[in-house]
Amino acid sequence: MKSKKERFPNTNTNLKIDAASKTSVGFPAILGSVEHMRKYMDMPDALKASLKMNQQSGFDCAGCAWPDPDDDRSSIGEYCENGIKALAEEATVAKADPDFFAKYSIDELGAMTEFKLGKAGRITHPMLLEKGGTHYKETSWERAFEVIAEELNGLSSPNEAVFYTSGRTSNEAAFMYGLLARAYGTNNLPDCSNMCHETSGAALSEVLGIGKGSVSLEDLHNADLIIVMGQNPGTNHPRMLTALENCKLNGGKIISVNPLKEAGLIKYTNPQKPMRLLFGGVDLTDLYLHVKINGDMALLKAIIYLLLQREEADGGVFDHHFIREYTVGYEDLIESIKKIDFQRCIKDSGISELEIVKAVDMICAGKNMIICWAMGITQHANGVETIREIVNLLLLRGSIGKKAAGVCPVRGHSNVQGDRTMGIWEKMGESFLSNLEKAFQTDIPREEGYATVPAIKAMHAGKAKVFIGMGGNFVSAVPDTDYCAEGLRRCNLTVHISTKPNRSHIVHGKRALILPVLGRSEIDMQESGYQFVSTENSMGVVQNSKGVLAPKSEHQLSEVAVVCGIGNALFANSDKVNIDWDSYRSNYDNIRDKIEEVIPGFENYNERVREKSGFYLPNGVKERNFKTSEGKAIFTVNDLPVNHLADGEFQLGTVRAHDQYNTTLYGLDDRYRGIKNGRNIIFMNKADMKYIGLRAKDRVNVHSDYNGERRSIYDFMIVPYDIPSRNLMAYFPEANPLVPIDHAHKITHTPVSKNIIVTLEIIQN
Ligand SMILES: Nc1nc2c(c(=O)[nH]1)N[C@H]1C(S)=C(S)[C@@H](COP(=O)(O)OP(=O)(O)OC[C@H]3O[C@@H](n4cnc5c(=O)[nH]c(N)nc54)[C@H](O)[C@@H]3O)O[C@H]1N2
Ligand SMILES: Nc1nc2c(c(=O)[nH]1)N[C@H]1C(S)=C(S)[C@@H](COP(=O)(O)OP(=O)(O)OC[C@H]3O[C@@H](n4cnc5c(=O)[nH]c(N)nc54)[C@H](O)[C@@H]3O)O[C@H]1N2
Ligand code: SF4
Ligand SMILES: [Mo]
């Protein structure tokens, strides 16, 4: 039963379509950064912050999880255009203060685009929406904590509460937040990772023994071959382009696998190298494989098939010493590969035999290969399986656990990997839970909690009644927007610990709170003095991060202080939980001492985190120590997915534009793809357009029919694009209402955001 359609207001103002760019960064990126700082920030703040971002004595960029160099850092700026946009978004002078919330009712806020909502500025005061209220009203922190304690204490089971986390939260805040939920009695700790690299974690833990990547920046620089699959680093991890450039300059090669020709993968002009700015950039991709959506498994299998043929003809292709010593399952894999239908792999991948042979030549030409991937691989019903196949390819070549080789899942949010390490997961293992129990002398539940999709279903079914979000924008980020909105509306209380207004504040429970917090760039002062926090990047390096800018409001608390405030109120009368929340809030060293007690790899945390470049967490895969169920790396046999399309059906993927950070819109353009002033668009193959009789800017409604239910988005404009036939792309989050809640990976529950089966309905003018 759905009561209200939750649609993102249409942003198409005066849509302009230009040719897609064939090169990235360079002057336009520099101009883009300066423009953002000038428009939204105070100039002295902009200067101060830009000199400290990603520096060894500064703060960690809150953009993506790409690592900083271990030693030498550029003094003119160790960041990219998107890092600056993330900073300008956080350090904006605009304020969403009580006057702003008094001016606009919830309905009026709901009519604003994500862009306009975000541009309202930083939330300055705790805000409360009482039952039946039309406006959020200023409240005190004491009252806010009381309301949360009241509602949580009123539930009939702790499992009726959901504690969501987005991946910006620091290690210290995440650890305390997980403790809060578990001391209260639940493992309901879903996070953005459930929708992101959950599949990577699941696949890699199973076959290699650790759910993280195994390479460093230096490895990327020295690889003979890097394969970039399902990732758009020019927009989403811009400084990765410098690593790819270094690889190329050292003689390495790059293969890109992507249904879209992404400018960032074609050519890169490094903004930190003035001569390159003048004389043009470096060509990055040597072989661009224009794969069909979810054709990656077929491509990988075809590659392995041809490698096996060469191995059988001439030998020397597979690393038999490595396979014998360090792996299990080789024979089964080979037997299954011998049986595959090579022609079907060509058809399903959309890549010709000639191109596959070129890829195989490049793989055989080098000794050390790295495979990088992101959402184009993970957000599929068979995401875990494709990642296992990636590992098969690396294992056959012995390209793992040695220099310049290995797996590189490129993480999204700046501390999403650290949050997991800290225990933000609905199914942490027994050793973590029992260590936590011992360290805090508190009962810790063992029952598995809800991941994101099960949490939405529980709210919808009335089984979860309080939702707390540590950052993030739940309703916009998750699949099936209407269904989720209905779930949130059924809650007794929704709480958002946020920096900026977003749609999740508007789609609220019977009562709702917005709690304003400090950002990464801001000074965090507590009783014991100036605090720093720590984060873990995509390559397992833990580093400190110390804000430098004055807070935008005296009423904003740090995330740690909010968690401790809730803890104090919630357990005020508890005879079971006796945690000294004040001591952790007043000095974060006390939190790090506890992390050291609970989590292996954090020995001497307080000392090592103060070292300039931080420290690497242990990673057995790097030493060929595979802590799997077999004690060795595991080859797996994975099925080819069936991507059947009936007449009139298309596969639709959802991607990020260059001017957004997930659900936060920095602007309405997508520079590299040639789009200006609009996001309600569908990228479509030109031949398909001609066949149906569609022209550029024709308007369509898009329907997804899944298990007998229709989901729709309305009034999207067609944009001709270089994309395989029967494949479409649209932007996240505008297309999220199309993603069926039940269409998720069967083990990880990761929503299938990159492969939605849709039909188009042409709007007649
Ligand atoms: N500026 C900016 N930076 C960000 C973010 C942001 O929104 N803005 N988000 C952050 C987060 S949380 C994350 S997870 C990362 C996301 O980083 P990405 O994974 O790069 O993000 P997406 O836009 O989802 O792009 C996925 C890419 O996969 C391709 N693709 C789609 N389907 C398939 C497929 O079936 N096969 C293959 N091979 N490719 C496919 C798309 O064409 C696109 O190039 O970025 C992080 N960094
Ligand atoms: N269809 C589709 N859906 C997707 C995806 C997709 O590719 N396609 N990608 C998925 C992925 S990979 C991810 S990671 C999720 C992202 O899901 P989320 O992490 O939930 O979403 P964000 O848009 O990153 O959250 C933005 C909000 O976080 C708050 N915020 C920003 N900085 C801070 C801070 O320092 N502290 C606190 N407390 N709050 C802060 C602000 O209020 C802002 O509005 O979305 C997923 N959803
Ligand atoms: S690459 Fe990512 S972490 Fe680095 S500066 Fe850019 S947005 Fe920030
Ligand atoms: Mo993500």
Image (spheres, helix red, strand yellow):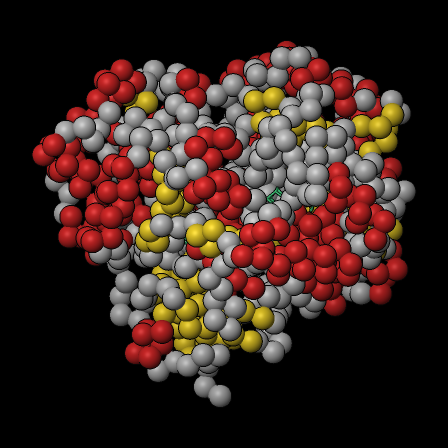
Q: Residue furthest left?
A: 313
* Residue 162, visible in the rendered structure: no
In the image, 400 versus 605, the foreground residue is: 400
Residue at (27% x, 37% y) in the render? 365
Residue at (27% x, 20% y) in the render? 322
In the image, 330 versus 273, the foreground residue is: 273
**Image position of 722 with respect to 453: above or below:** below
Residue 346 is situated, as x and y percent measured from the top left of the image, at 21, 53
Residue at (36% x, 36% y) in the render? 224
**Image position of 607 with respect to 145: above or below:** above
Left or right of 670 in this view: 307: left
In the image, 202 versus 228, the foreground residue is: 228
Residue at (59% x, 74% y) in the render? 12
Q: Residue furthest bottom?
A: 765
Residue 73 is situated, as x and y percent measured from the top left of the image, at 65, 34
Looking at the rendering, which quadrant does residue 755 occupy? bottom left
Left or right of 203 in this view: 237: right
Residue 332 is situated, as x and y percent measured from the top left of the image, at 18, 28
Count how many numbered circles sit on residues in the image: 0
In the image, 26 versus 714, the foreground residue is: 26
Looking at the rendering, which quadrant does residue 445 occupy? top right
Residue 593 is situated, as x and y percent measured from the top left of the image, at 70, 15
* Residue 135, visible in the rendered structure: yes
